[in-house]
């Protein structure tokens, strides 16, 4: 079994983090292969067995998570490139030249893509060149669009050529039309070329993405050798002497490097770096952590922000301390010349591993806060925390040891069998430690359930948590099966991704918690800063809290996007995809010939908000300043104010749609498509809206009217788009749809003449002179201050009876709303006036004793209910007396 020096990248190395330069085999081969050892010449890839070639090729295909941070660095680089491209395009005076340059660059990319042997990092570099090109094309087209519109306007002003029979135009007009037409043609051609190049760039981008995915899949799913294959371990044992010799060669080279550069300055540099590393790991880390906690407690308000900010400070301090310590030693060794070039990747891996171990330990302290239950971001008991507090560190330790082992194999150019065995063993160990951590997490959950915490049971039983746990278990099972059947590259890739995704989710959760606590606490009306800000900018505390919630949601969405990029980076999704998605809010996307831009939608929403603010300002000006100085009644004022609101709303909507690019013909199509839905589903809404417009126009009912609808009556307070608010006399509010006022009968008490009418019915004994009754009633009515003198009060003799006579007194008051109170006052006054005049008012008839006796007899059962009641004795019922006969003479 032979070793190949190109394995120095190690299995699972992210090529985006370590760009590979094309180098000849001899240039990359250690000197021990070239001098005095001809029998151990470096192998050629074509002579490597199939499973070894698969392992060799997969080394370039399995990006490991520790180097996925390079995706963010590439994102930053690409952002700077995009800014530079935008500045370059804006500086260019000729958009056509930018289109030509894009055409040339696109041709070069297509020529490069014709090479079928391009690696992933080369494809990624080509794809990164497309984004600035797209920006340049968009800028060029945006510069040419106004020129095209101006040319169209000039041609429209000149007009078409005269037809036959029409007066001829001058030569100057004809020449000007031809010149403008030629200029328009050039601009239009340039715009079409730019749009064509945009389409080609999108197609090439999709082609590169597909090639990268195919390349990643082909490398991951190439089969190597199984861990349970005895021949693999036999090859490892057989190659052990040679691998040990390689290790000794690296040690000798390292010792020789130190001996050549050994001196006082190098010793001082390394000693100072080691001292700085020790100080960073112990006293400085502890002091910074304690100082940060005290600072947060002093500065942060008494809210959840103290807990989350302290957790973030712990994470940062615990992560940076080992990372900076290892970085100091690494830089000192390089500066002193004590680090061989072959060992630099190994040293860099050690630095990253120190940082990752610090991150795992810091995240444990931040989330679980062992020994400090009140400072935990995740509410767990001490017993549950004791079950899982060391699991993240063990998982991270095994993961880092695997990365260090891969880097060490690459540094010593270990045999392929040793590399396969190392990668497979650590992939299985990663899966096993993660599975053990999940098991301990389940035990912690059982402890929480035994203590009876329903909210924690609900959190652990959440569908998302269940799906995440099932996905992790499935990935672990896939890793174990893959190392058994020989897909070591796939196993290592999945094991790394499980750990990397878990770390990213932890970090995203912590950052989102801090951001949410920061905005909701800082902009809360309960904090001093929130109260000061609210009074300073003139915003209500509730509105300020809503702003804080919106800002928190926006920032957390950005955190989720960055986390998704970090997770998807090893799967072939690069920074170009992220910035392509970020450009969508600006450039928009086209649907059915209409370009929908989220930025345009937000601008239209801002236009609508400003328009509504101006409309409400005009309405307030009318309501407070102008209308009160007119002689219009309150109902007409309310109708004018509401009509201005409707008119402003219509204008704002039309302007917003026009800003979004909806022309009248498109609006007609949309209205026609919605007419069916309006006719069926929105019929009642449209009916109420139209009824509200009719009420405002015809004004049969207006604000302030006293109306009676059904069994309810009250005063109209407001007529809105859909309904009308009526305040009943018991101070409750009745909401009535506007269509009810159009389709049903409604009594408007105050719609007609402003005067109210009072009617009082009187029953006076028939023995009283009617003229006397009339005099007393009229005088009493006139004596009331609210009774109008014109029309004068009048009394009508409405009924003539044997025992009493009926009269009706009518009088008018200034408003119908005074009728009830005036009627009550007149009733009191009439009783007193009739008593003073000696006029007795008729009362109810005396009870009929005969009927009372009959009802008692029926109740006692002395007579049947159907029997004829005894009539009261009346002289008319007596038999007629015979006429007296004349006596005989």
Image: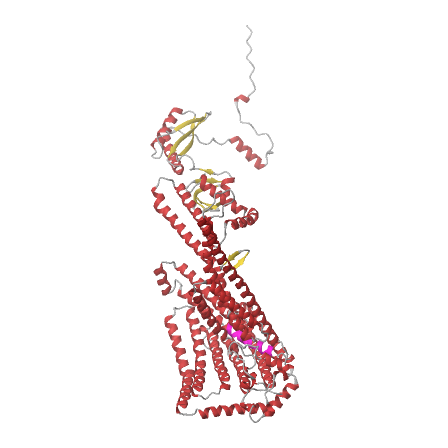
Residue 503 part of the magenta segment: yes
Tell me the chief SS of the magenta region: helix
* Residue closer to the observer: 236 or 743: 236
Q: Quadrant of residue 143?
A: bottom left
Q: Which residues are magenta?
A: 489-504
Q: Identify whether 430 is placed above or below 587.
A: below
Q: Is residue 447 visible?
A: no
- Residue 547 inside the magenta-drawn segment: no
x%, y% of residue 693?
47, 43
Judge whether residue 233 can be spotted in this image: yes
Dividing the image into 4 quarters, which one contains the C terminus?
A: top right
In the rendered view, does 89 fall on the left or right side of 591? left
Q: Is 271 rendered above or below residue 200?
A: below
| Residue 852 shown left or right of residue 321 in the figure | right
Q: Position of residue 184 (x, y in %)?
A: 48, 55
Q: Is residue 640 above or below residue 77?
A: above
Q: Quadrant of residue 463?
A: bottom right
Q: Nearer the viewer, residue 817 or 767?
A: 817
Measured as percent of width and height from the top left, residue 357 is found at 49, 80
From the viewer's side, name the closer residue of 674 and 710: 674
Question: Which colour scheme appears in the figure?
Answer: secondary structure
Quadrant occupied by the N terminus: bottom right
């Amino acid at each position: 079994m032979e070793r190949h020096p190109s394995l120095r990248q190690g299995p699972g190395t992210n090529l985006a983090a370590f760009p590979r330069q094309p180098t000849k085999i001899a240039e990359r081969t250690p000197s021990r292969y070239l001098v005095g050892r001809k029998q151990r010449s470096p192998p050629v890839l074509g002579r490597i067995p199939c499973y070894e070639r698969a392992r060799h090729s997969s080394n370039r295909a399995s990006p490991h998570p520790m180097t996925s941070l390079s995706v963010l660095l590439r994102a930053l680089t690409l952002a700077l490139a995009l800014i530079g491209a935008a500045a370059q395009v804006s500086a260019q005076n000729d958009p056509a030249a930018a289109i030509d340059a894009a055409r040339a660059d696109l041709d070069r990319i297509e020529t490069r893509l014709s090479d079928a042997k391009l690696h992933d990092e080369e494809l990624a570099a080509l794809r990164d060149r497309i984004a600035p090109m797209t920006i340049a094309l968009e800028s060029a087209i945006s510069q040419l669009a106004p020129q095209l519109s101006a040319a169209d306007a000039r041609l429209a002003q000149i007009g078409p050529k005269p037809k036959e029979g029409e007066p001829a135009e001058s030569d100057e007009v004809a020449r000007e039309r031809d010149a403008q037409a030629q200029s328009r043609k050039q601009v239009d051609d340039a715009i079409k070329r730019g749009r064509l190049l945009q389409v080609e760039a999108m197609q090439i981008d999709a082609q590169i993405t597909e090639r990268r995915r195919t390349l990643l899949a082909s490398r991951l799913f190439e089969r190597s050798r199984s861990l349970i294959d005895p021949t693999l371990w036999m090859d490892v044992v057989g190659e052990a002497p040679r691998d040990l010799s390689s290790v000794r060669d690296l040690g000798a080279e390292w010792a020789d490097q130190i001996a050549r550069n050994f001196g006082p300055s190098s010793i001082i540099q390394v000693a100072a770096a080691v001292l700085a590393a020790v100080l960073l790991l112990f006293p400085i880390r502890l002091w910074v952590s304690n100082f940060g906690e005290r600072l947060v407690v002093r500065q942060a308000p008494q809210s959840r922000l103290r807990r989350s900010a302290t957790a973030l400070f712990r994470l940062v301090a615990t992560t940076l301390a080992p990372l900076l310590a290892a970085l100091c030693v690494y830089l000192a060794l390089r500066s002193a010349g004590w680090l061989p070039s072959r060992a630099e990747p190994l040293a860099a891996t050690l630095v990253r591993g120190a940082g990752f171990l610090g991150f795992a330990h810091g995240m444990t302290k931040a989330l679980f806060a062992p020994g400090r239950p009140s400072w935990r971001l995740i509410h767990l008991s001490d017993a549950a925390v004791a079950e899982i507090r060391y699991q993240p560190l063990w998982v991270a330790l095994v993961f880092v040891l695997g990365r260090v082992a891969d880097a060490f194999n690459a540094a010593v150019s270990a045999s392929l069998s040793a590399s396969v065995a190392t990668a497979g063993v650590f992939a299985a160990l990663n899966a096993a430690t993660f599975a053990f951590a999940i098991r301990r997490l389940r035990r912690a959950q059982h402890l929480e359930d035994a203590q009876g915490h329903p909210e924690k049971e609900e959190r652990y039983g959440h569908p998302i948590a269940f799906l995440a746990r099932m996905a992790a278990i499935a990935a672990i099972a896939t890793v174990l099966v893959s190392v058994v059947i020989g897909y070591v590259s796939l196993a290592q890739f999945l094991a790394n991704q499980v750990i990397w995704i878990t770390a990213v989710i932890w970090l995203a959760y912590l950052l989102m918690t801090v951001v949410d606590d920061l905005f909701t606490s800082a902009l809360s009306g309960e904090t001093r800063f929130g109260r000061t800000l609210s009074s300073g900018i003139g915003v209500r505390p509730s509105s300020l809290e809503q702003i804080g919630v919106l800002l928190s949601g926006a920032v957390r969405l950005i955190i989720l996007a960055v986390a998704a990029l970090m997770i998807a980076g090893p799967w072939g999704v690069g920074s170009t995809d992220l910035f392509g998605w970020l450009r969508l809010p600006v450039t928009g996307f086209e649907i059915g010939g209409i370009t929908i831009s989220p930025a345009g939608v937000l601008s239209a929403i801002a236009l609508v908000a400003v328009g509504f603010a101006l409309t409400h300002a005009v309405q307030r000006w009318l309501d407070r300043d102008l209308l009160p100085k007119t002689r219009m009644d309150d109902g007409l004022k309310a109708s004018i104010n509401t009509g201005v609101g409707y008119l402003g709303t219509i204008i704002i909507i039309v302007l917003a749609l026009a800003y979004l690019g909806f022309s009248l013909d498109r609006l007609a199509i949309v209205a026609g498509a919605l007419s069916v839905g309006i006719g069926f589903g929105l019929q009642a809404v449209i009916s109420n809206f139209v009824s509200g417009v009719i009420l405002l126009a015809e004004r049969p009912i207006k604000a302030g009217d006293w109306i009676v609808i059904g069994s309810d009556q009250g005063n109209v307070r407001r007529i809105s788009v859909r309904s009308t608010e009526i305040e009943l006399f018991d101070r409750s509010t009745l909401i009535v749809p506007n269509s009810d006022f159009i389709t049903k009968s409604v009594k408007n008490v105050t719609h007609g003449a402003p005067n109210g009418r009072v009617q009082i019915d009187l029953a006076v004994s028939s023995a009283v002179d009617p003229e006397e009754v009339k005099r007393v009633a009229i005088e009493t009515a006139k004596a009331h201050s609210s009774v109008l003198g014109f029309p004068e009060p009048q009394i009508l003799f409405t009924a003539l009876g044997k025992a009493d006579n009926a009269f009706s007194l009518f009088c008018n008051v200034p408003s119908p709303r005074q009728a009830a109170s005036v009627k009550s006052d007149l009733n009191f006054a009439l009783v007193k006036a009739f008593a003073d005049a000696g006029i007795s008012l008729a009362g109810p008839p005396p009870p009929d004793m005969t009927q009372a006796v009959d009802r008692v007899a029926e109740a006692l059962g002395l007579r049947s209910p159907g029997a004829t009641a005894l009539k009261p004795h009346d002289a008319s019922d007596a038999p007629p007396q015979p006429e007296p006969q004349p006596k005989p003479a």
